[in-house]
Image (tube, rainbow, N blue to C red):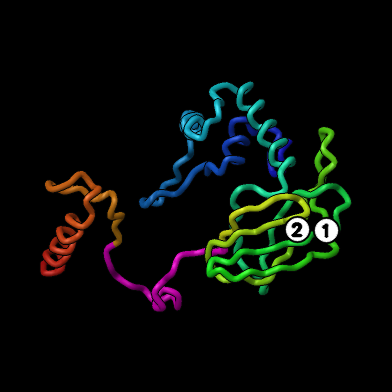
Amino acid sequence: MAEGASASETALARLARRYGIEPGFRDARGEDVVTSDAANVRLLRAMGVEADTERKAAAALEQAERAAWASALPPVVVVRPEDDRCVVEIVAPAGTRRIAWRLEMEDGAELRGTAEKLAPLRRTGGGLDREQVQLLLPGLPWGYHRLHLPELDASAVLIVTPGKCWLPKGMEDGAGLWGIAAQLYLLRSERNGGSAISATSPTLSRFRRREAAT
């Protein structure tokens, strides 16, 4: 059973989670919306995974888990610097305690290093003698970099993120601010169906001024 899964959880739910599909969200009205099985099936199909029955979902889940153990790195890794370091989980042959790494930075610079005394997190079964370990990298600037593990013949895009969107200082400090929040791509008007943002934004601005005047 996959890590974090409960005995009552369906194979479809575990498969959806592995592919990054959220089980639900809270909408703008504060109401919880649960992702339906049908939505999971459609989203997985869009990613090339057939899971319209539990049997298919279980088979796809097993295949995905074996593929994850067979590769040292996924295609893309997202990390958030903490305590002046970045932690990347990798898969290596069991017993590996030393890994050389190389980073191609977004600005063209290059960093190299060797991680010693890797602590194993968990070990796979199914005939694959491999372990999941933590690779500790130095604190890195936000951006899109590329991580290489030459000894494992693996590389991945490494996205370093602050973990949250920028906020005005007043909101960072807890002050209340008033304004209009709008998803521009969802705006509709007589002049466009929502894609021509440059034409719709002035309409929103005029509406805001009219409402403020009243």
Main secondary-structure element of the magenta-colored stretch = loop
Q: What residue is pinned by disc 2? A: 134
SS of the residue at dot 1? loop
User: Badge 2 local density, few (<14 within 10 Å), some, or many (20+)?
Assistant: some
In the displayed structure, would residue 167 be above or below residue 159?
below
Name the residue nearer the viewer: 6 or 151.
151
Counting from the top left corner in percent of width and height, residue 35 is at 48, 37
Counting from the top left corner in percent of width and height, residue 166 is at 44, 69
Quadrant position of residue 142: bottom right
Name the residue nearer the viewer: 160 or 14.
160
Question: Relative to residue 120, is residue 205 drawn left or right?
Answer: left
Quadrant the N terminus occupies: top right
Q: What residue is pinned by disc 1? A: 119
Question: Relative to residue 179, is residue 192 drawn left or right?
Answer: left
**Boundaries of the magenta span:** 160-180
Counting from the top left corner in percent of width and height, residue 214 is at 11, 67
Instruction: Reply yes or no: does residue 212 show up in magenta.
Output: no
Image point (53%, 70%), residue name: 107
Image point (20%, 44%), residue name: 193
What amino acid does circle 1 point to?
A: Ala
